[in-house]
Structure formats: structure tokens, C-alpha cells
Amino acid sequence: MKRSSFIEKMLVISTAHLTHNSVKELDADIADRPDERSVLKWDAIIYPHATYGYLIHLSPDTPATGPLAKIDELARSIDCPWVLIDRDADQHPHLEAFDW
């Protein structure tokens, strides 16, 4: 399948795939921003999404680290450079979920 330069795929998963501590840390980093720009964290570019979520762009060259490592691995396996982590999204069966 030829990849279009105009359309990119996105993996959409639940916030349950991040630990409560990871979410608190990320939310604190986002709150420290003076404007609506992204946060560079765990080798990924992370944007806040609505009130309870994140839009993440994964580097094509460097895998994400920390809490995003397994998510990055899954996203790369299905050719998704974008990940939307949303509280209302479904949990993915191949990722660990945390109950918080």
C-alpha cells in the first residue's frame, strides 16, 4: 500500500494505557506552558487534546521512550505516526491498561 503524503493514520487508544503518575507528570508539564504549544517529552511531541487526552506525533527516526515505548512500538507496527490518547477511546488488547 502506497503511503500518501496528504493523509496519515492515527492509533486511537484509551488514557488507561498510561499510569496515573505519567498522566499527572504530563499534565503538569502542559500546565507549565505559557501558550498552546506542544511539549517534547519521552522523545515524542505531545499536544493536549480536549480536557482528557493527548495527541502525540511519533518521530519517524527515534522511538518514544518511557511510558510511550510500548505505544510507540504498536503504532509503528501498523504504520501510525500519530497517536490519540483519549479517555473515551477503547482499550487496546495488546497494551497494558492501568486502573486509576
Image: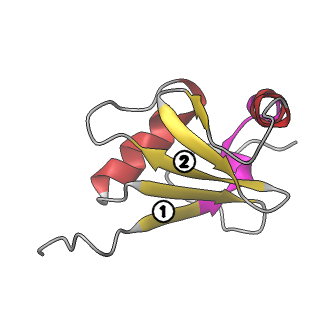
Rendered image quadrant of residue 12 = bottom right
Q: Position of residue 83 (x, y in %)?
A: 51, 56
The answer to whether residue 75 is above or below residue 41 is below
Count neighbours of disc 1 (C-alpha within 10 A) and say few if under 14, some if 14 to 19, many if 20 or more: many
Camera-side residue of 36 and 30: 36
Rendered image quadrant of residue 32 = top right
Q: Which residue is mark 2?
A: 95
Camera-side residue of 11 and 91: 11
Say which residue appears at 48% left-offset and 62% top-offset. 11
Q: Position of residue 63 (x, y in %)?
A: 36, 32
Say which residue appears at 29% left-offset and 75% top-offset. 6
What is the three-letter code of the residue carrying label 2?
A: Leu
Quarter holding the N terminus?
Answer: bottom left
Residue 11, numbered circle: 1
Q: How many marks?
A: 2
Say which residue appears at 48% left-offset and 25% top-offset. 65
